[in-house]
Image (cartoon, grey):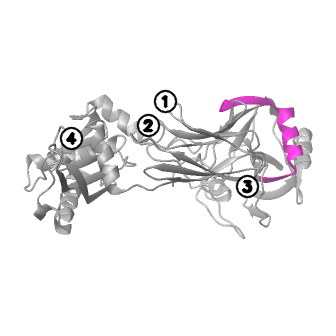
Amino acid sequence: MAERGNVSKSDLLQKVEDSGDVRLRFGVAHQDGKNSLILLDGEFGAELDRQDERTWTYEDLSFFDRLLHGSELRQFIEDGAIALGEQTVYFPAIGDTANWTRHPSLSDWGLGKFSWPTVEYDLSVTSHAQPGSGLLIGRDSPSFQSYHAAIAAFLGIDLMPGRQFNRSDISLRRHDRSGRITNVVWSPTTIDVVVEGDALANSVIELASPIPGEEHSLSEHPFQTFRFDIPDTGLPSGSWLVLRRDGEWLDYKFLNWPYALGPDSGVEKIVEEQDEIQSLISQGEGSTIEFKEDVPSQPGKERYGVCKTVAAFANGLGGTILLGVKDDGNIKGVPDEQQTRDAVDAITNWIKDIVGPLPDFDVRTVEIIHSDGSGETLSSKVISIEVGHGSSSPYCIRTTRPAKREYYVRRGATTFAAAPDQLRNIVMASRPAQTGLIQP
């Protein structure tokens, strides 16, 4: 199934009516003696929250939370008005088609993480009343500094202070209970999957990647479990689980790069430290992996070299630096005196001193059982510096000159100083994803 498309307004309203109950949140402007709809948010198609009806009232605005039957909403939209208590709220003229976007379960797209795969329908309007500006001071309702903060709070959306709420004036969401991937446990050798839904018969769960993978057929039972074996060479990049039927997806979960920086929500990854490090070593140096033969024991150029790569990883997809591994992937290990907790804490401290702002990173020692090349088995320890994709880009190096800042990026297996256009791209990429909560 395509992830975007359109449907006629009449077909959408029929879906709403057939679904039964629909939960609706209204934003209403009181202007020139008229109550005009400025926002309608609704959801249907799954078990809805039966919380008490809510009303927030201000001088020029009101917000309503109601549980109605789909047939009532259809009638209200066709009539162009709805009765909310003692008020009659008038709808703007609505277009004849709705744009839809489909999201997998537990995806975060600006309105929280919904448990089931969800289709969002946006209806366009020709004109509408404006919410106005200024403080919203409630008598029996909470107070807010703006309409945007108030409507975000009413809908339960996490909106950063000072940002604007920007979504379709009329938006309806249908939760699809046909099927979902409920839980995934990913170990070094297997992937265990739990699938549930009301219409699983004739569907398939597939471990997909650029290399065709294993798949299992489902029965009509509402809860089913499956196991996929991971090849000895590891899970290929670009792997994902897809629940599908008749050429359409019901739900999916991305497992690894490049589709996701980390596993999607609902995927629990259980990794043995040694297996994880040996897998990284086997891949060789690249855009997210760096080897350093020695641990920089003294302040100076070598420490700055490590920190440049930390900053470059944070400015990109994240990555891992392995200290005690030669450029060719052979394991040298770190000396005993550098394996202590104090030594690891020292690395943490000089990264904190040199890289700014502070990225998300973790430093740990890992014991590796390996061969020395002649068949003899050895035990060595390496130090892993795991750097996350940064949310506060751009990250820089604080040099010995207090006013000077240096920015770095990763290209292939090399760390480079960022060019002006690359730095600009890093800054743009750090802005919040365009999920409906936009515009600085």
Q: Do the residues labelled 2 and 3 touch (CB within 8 Å)?
A: no
Disc 3 marks a residue whose amino acid type is: Leu
Which residue range is magenta in the image? 1-24
- The Cα atoms of the two marked residues, 4 and 1, are separated by 26 Å
Q: Do the residues labelled 4 and 1 touch (CB within 8 Å)?
A: no
Residue 116 located left or right of residue 401: right
Residue in the picture at 52% in, 49% down: 191
Residue 6 is covered by the magenta coloring: yes
Sequence-earlier tag: 4 or 2 = 2
Residue in the picture at 63% in, 43% down: 104
Near mark 3 (Cα within 10 A), the count class, few <14, some 14-19 or many ≥20, is many
Residue position marked by numbered label 2 in the rendering: 236
Helix, strand or loop at mark 2: loop
Residue position marked by numbered label 4 in the rendering: 329
Residue position marked by numbered label 1 in the rendering: 210
Q: Position of residue 172 (x, y in %)?
A: 75, 44
Residue sitting nearer the eye, 253 or 148: 253
Residue position marked by numbered label 3 in the rendering: 61
Residue in the picture at 37% in, 41% down: 317
- Which is in the foreground here, disc 3 or disc 4? 4
Sequence-earlier tag: 4 or 1 = 1
Helix, strand or loop at mark 4: loop
Sequence-earlier tag: 3 or 4 = 3
Residue 350 is covered by the magenta coloring: no
Q: Is residue 270 visible?
A: yes
Disc 2 marks a residue whose amino acid type is: Pro
